[in-house]
Image (cartoon, rainbow, N blue to C red):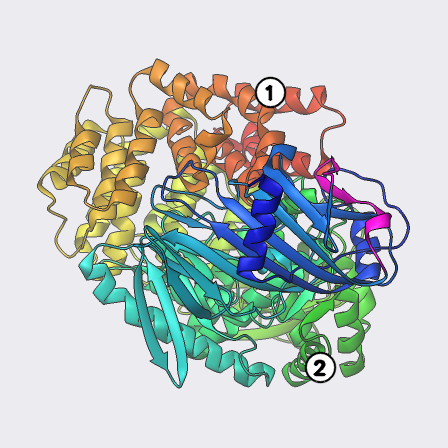
């Protein structure tokens, strides 16, 4: 039997029907998926149905023989491009409308000549070997992750978000594997050493949301309020399983209930399913019916902090919100990818507000979004929320903290501008109008504009289409002991007169009382009329409610009193203000602020604020102090943190302080204390340490110990979970005392197969480039920058940024800064989006040249 006959016989056995595609004018055959190609296909192709079968062997490296049928309608026949980012050797046979044709393959596209196509319904059959890159194959499990344009790396398709299709999937897998996909399982057929699962036809999906996972999983299902939910995971810790599984189901139920009520649309897909995946690249990915999560984010234990529980709830709410925002209504092109993320974050925050209460929500919103957004928007590489995109292969560079964190801040300001009720009405109309279809940001703005008298188009220009943040200054005048005039002015951080319309509060603090004033900053200069005639305050707390976005002034009299501010939200806003002013070279030098923060850890009792303080403090310690300065203050810091830990009555706060102590310790005495804790597995009183905690401690001890030791080997022997063992084995060379072994590890990253587990890579790089290792690691910086373009082409969406952050975030010396500048100067035509990523990731290094002492 020849190969063509064999593949087409298999099609008849599986029953045929499949895909659909484009038409119109001939479009240039370019690498990737160009906007021109996507537009032409969108205008010509409709009614797409994919039928896919993957025969997945147990052996991780064995080829996955696959077949595909694509049914689609053409408005008019024309040359057709089908995306497939593989070598031509992966293609075995092609037939169009029942006729076998020669394979014509160019620049990642299968070319189907016009002569084989017709106006109306068409059918294509393809036999192929699936690409492995986005199937994330592991020893005994795999998972398909196709966002933003990676479906084409696995199977031939029309890989663009506005060509939604139905997917009829079947999988042949080893008999002891379990499977999950977008659609409900229909039936199965057991063979000698394998089993074939057939799924029902999926709901209409873009290719990036089509997904499946298969492997040695534990299967759990529960019925929650008449909804069947299923869960696959690989966790082996019985305590974590008992402590987490029910909570994960409940969190999904609560999120769905809230979103159904808020949107007035029932859960829009045929099934609810989710999988916990070890070392998943993201926190989660919103495939309908098969949401993928990082397992460690779902499986918590009795040592988990309140913040971890809130973060899990928020993550589940985020991915669930995507069922409406992104999955039901999908952006037309990936330049609007931020739309699905802003709504997912925004709605997840609303779920958190309902479940946790307004005060907790406000504090978490401030801490989750503002520092992360500022971390990009204050840099020379700041990008707007909405960006241009000419080719889908560049879509991964669109992702980052601006769309995940500045956009929710923008959306909250939009809701304040419109009013909650009008905002909700507009969103409901948008979801109803574009259900199971595609929409643009302009489509949404058009609808929202009908529900407000405000000029949303002008508002949109500065908030959405331009980068950067405002810098606020103030002027106050007195007549005697009374305020005669208080005004705030805003300007762009990088110069130029720009206005970010927004509302926030300032608080006038007096010895025995205070007065909160609302500022509606809609113009370059805003007069706070309410302040006129009020007594002269002891100090002013700017952006007291944390709602304002920008760099706000710091009243020095406030700093002395900051830990006496009763409201945790106001304290958090003050901490963020102080840190941002330090970075900008205003108000504080790094050491001065660190001393203030060090005092704070002894008196701050709010768990989320304590985490914020310790994060800022450790970042200043490693990034904005010279090595000599660190050495001179280390013992004081160790002593202060340890004493605070011992005195702290709350277990979660103790855990935060313990992690800070582990982070900054350098002295032999502290090392001996931590080694004894690790060796005896005896945590300080009041703290619960689990296997992951001891593994983290072992890695830190190995990093900071300058003598040969067996800490990591002993930790490896203690570790029971196979996935966590494999991770530890991968990390060990990056921490080795042998410079040659570290050299070999870095050089191994030049081979793509050694970068497959991206979460492992970035963790290893953070250890490799830790400040105490930088003398021997600076030599890796040029090579790391040289690899960035390949990282962007071959990695998942967050990998370029996380690669850079893991490498550069701890550097502060002139040599490292010169390496970055030399690279940028020697690459004047460098990819502008990647250049922005470099400028973002090295912003602290740039600022350190002025403020380190």
Left or right of 636, for residue 239: left
* Image coordinates for residue 405, horizontal then vertical, percent: 57, 57
Question: Per the image, is 106 magenta?
Answer: yes
Q: Residue at x 36, y 30 (%)?
A: 630
Q: Is residue 77 depicted above or below 662 in this figure? A: below
Q: Place residue 245 in its image quadrant.
A: bottom left
The quarter of the image holding the N terminus is: top right
Is residue 9 something that shows in the picture?
yes
Nearer to me, 491 or 691: 691
Q: Position of residue 845 (x, y in %)?
A: 55, 31
Left or right, residue 731 beside residue 795: left
**Residue at left offset 21%, top offset 66%:** 242
- Report crowding for label 1: few under 14, some 14 to 19, many 20 or more residues within 10 A (C-alpha): few
- In the image, the segment drawn in magenta is 102-118
Q: Is residue 521 inside the magenta stretch?
A: no
Whichever of callouts 1 and 2 sits on the residue coming sooner in the sequence is: 2
Say which quarter of the image contains residue 670: top left
Label 1: state its secondary structure: helix
Q: Position of residue 75 (x, y in %)?
A: 86, 63
Measure the alpha-carbon separation of dots 1 and 2: 53 Å
Name the disc covering residue 644, or none. none
Identify the disc placed on residue 429: 2
| Residue at mark 1 | 818
Most extreme residue toward the left is 680
On screen, 456 above or below 24? below
* In contact (CB < 8 Å): disc 1 and disc 2: no
Q: Is residue 814 visible?
A: no
Q: Work out whether residue 781 or residue 643 is closer to the camera in this orientation and state it.
A: 781
């Amino acid at each position: 039997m020849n190969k063509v006959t064999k593949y087409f016989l298999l099609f008849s056995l599986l029953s045929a029907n499949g895909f659909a595609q484009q038409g119109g004018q001939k479009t240039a055959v370019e690498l990737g998926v160009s906007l021109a190609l996507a537009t032409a296909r969108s205008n010509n192709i409709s009614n797409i149905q994919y039928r896919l079968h993957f025969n997945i062997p147990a052996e991780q490296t064995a080829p996955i023989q696959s077949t595909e049928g694509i049914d689609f309608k053409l408005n008019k026949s024309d040359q057709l491009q089908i995306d497939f980012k593989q070598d031509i050797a992966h293609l075995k046979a092609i037939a169009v409308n029942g006729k076998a044709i020669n394979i014509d393959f160019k620049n990642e596209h299968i070319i189907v000549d016009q002569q084989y196509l017709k106006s109306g319904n068409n059918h294509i059959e393809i036999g192929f070997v699936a690409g492995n890159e986005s199937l994330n194959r592991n020893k005994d499990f795999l998972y398909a992750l196709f966002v933003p344009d990676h479906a084409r790396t696995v199977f031939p398709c029309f890989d663009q978000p506005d060509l939604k299709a139905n997917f009829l999937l079947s999988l042949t897998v080893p008999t002891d594997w379990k499977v999950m996909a977008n659609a409900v399982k229909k039936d199965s057929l057991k063979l000698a050493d394998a089993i074939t699962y057939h799924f029902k036809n999926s709901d209409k999906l873009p290719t990036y949301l089509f997904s499946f996972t298969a492997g040695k999983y534990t299967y759990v299902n529960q019925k929650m309020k008449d909804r069947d939910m299923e869960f696959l995971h690989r966790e082996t810790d019985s305590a974590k399983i008992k402590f987490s599984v029910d909570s994960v189901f409940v969190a999904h139920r609560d999120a769905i209930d809230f979103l159904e009520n808020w949107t007035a649309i029932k859960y829009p897909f045929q099934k609810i399913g989710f999988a916990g995946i070890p070392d998943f690249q993201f926190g989660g990915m919103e495939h309908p019916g098969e949401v993928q999560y990082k397992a460690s984010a779902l499986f918590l234990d009795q040592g988990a902090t309140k913040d971890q529980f809130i973060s899990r709830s928020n993550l589940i709410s985020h991915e669930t919100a995507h069922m409406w925002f992104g999955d039901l209504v999908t952006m037309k092109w990936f330049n609007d990818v931020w739309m699905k993320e802003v709504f997912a974050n925004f709605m997840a925050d609303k779920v958190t507000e309902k479940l946790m209460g307004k005060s907790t929500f406000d504090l978490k919103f401030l801490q989750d979004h503002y520092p992360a957004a500022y971390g990009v928007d204050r840099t020379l590489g700041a990008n707007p929320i909405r960006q241009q995109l000419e080719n889908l292969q560049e879509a991964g560079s669109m992702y980052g903290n601006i769309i995940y964190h500045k956009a929710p801040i923008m959306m909250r300001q939009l809701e304040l501008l419109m009013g909650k009720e009008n905002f909700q009405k507009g969103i409901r109309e948008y979801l109803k109008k574009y259900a199971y279809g595609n929409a643009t940001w302009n489509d949404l703005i058009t609808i929202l504009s009908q529900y407000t008298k405000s000029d949303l188009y002008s508002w949109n220009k500065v908030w959405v289409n331009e980068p950067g943040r405002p810098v606020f200054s103030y002027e106050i005048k007195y007549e005697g002991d009374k305020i005669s005039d208080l005004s705030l002015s805003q300007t762009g951080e990088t110069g130029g007169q720009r206005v970010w319309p927004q509302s926030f509060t300032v608080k006038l603090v007096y010895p025995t009382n205070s007065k909160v004033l609302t500022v509606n900053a809609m113009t370059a200069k805003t007069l706070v009329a309410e302040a006129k005639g009020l007594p002269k305050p002891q100090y002013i707390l700017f952006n007291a409610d944390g709602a304002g976005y920008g760099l706000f002034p710091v009243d020095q009299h406030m700093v002395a009193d900051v830990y006496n501010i009763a409201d945790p939200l106001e304290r958090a806003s003050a901490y963020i203000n102080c840190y941002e002013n330090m970075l900008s070279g205003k108000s504080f030098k790094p050491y001065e602020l660190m001393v203030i923060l060090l005092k704070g850890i002894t008196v701050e009792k709010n768990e989320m604020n304590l985490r914020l303080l310790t994060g800022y403090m450790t970042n200043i310690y490693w990034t904005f102090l010279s090595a000599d300065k660190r050495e001179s203050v280390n013992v004081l810091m160790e002593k202060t943190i340890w004493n605070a830990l011992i005195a702290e009555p709350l277990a979660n706060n103790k855990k935060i302080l313990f992690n800070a102590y582990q982070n900054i310790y350098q002295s032999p005495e502290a090392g001996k204390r931590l080694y004894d804790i690790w060796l005896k597995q005896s945590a300080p009183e009041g703290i619960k340490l689990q296997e992951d905690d001891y593994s983290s401690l072992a890695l830190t001890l190995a990093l900071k110990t300058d003598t040969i030791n067996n800490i990591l080997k002993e930790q490896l022997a203690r570790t029971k979970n196979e996935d966590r063992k494999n991770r530890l084995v991968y990390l060990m060379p990056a921490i080795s005392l042998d410079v040659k072994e570290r050299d070999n590890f870095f050089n191994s990253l030049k081979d793509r197969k050694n970068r497959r587990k991206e979460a492992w890579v970035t963790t290893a790089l953070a250890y490799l480039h830790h400040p105490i290792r930088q003398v021997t690691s600076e030599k890796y910086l040029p090579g790391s920058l040289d690899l960035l373009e390949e990282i962007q082409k071959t990695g998942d969406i967050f990998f370029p940024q996380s690669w850079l952050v893991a490498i550069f975030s701890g550097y502060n010396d002139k040599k490292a800064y010169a390496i970055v500048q030399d690279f940028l100067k020697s690459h004047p035509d460098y990819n502008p989006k990647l250049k922005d990523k470099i400028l973002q990731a090295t912003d602290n290094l740039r600022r350190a040249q002025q403020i380190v002492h």
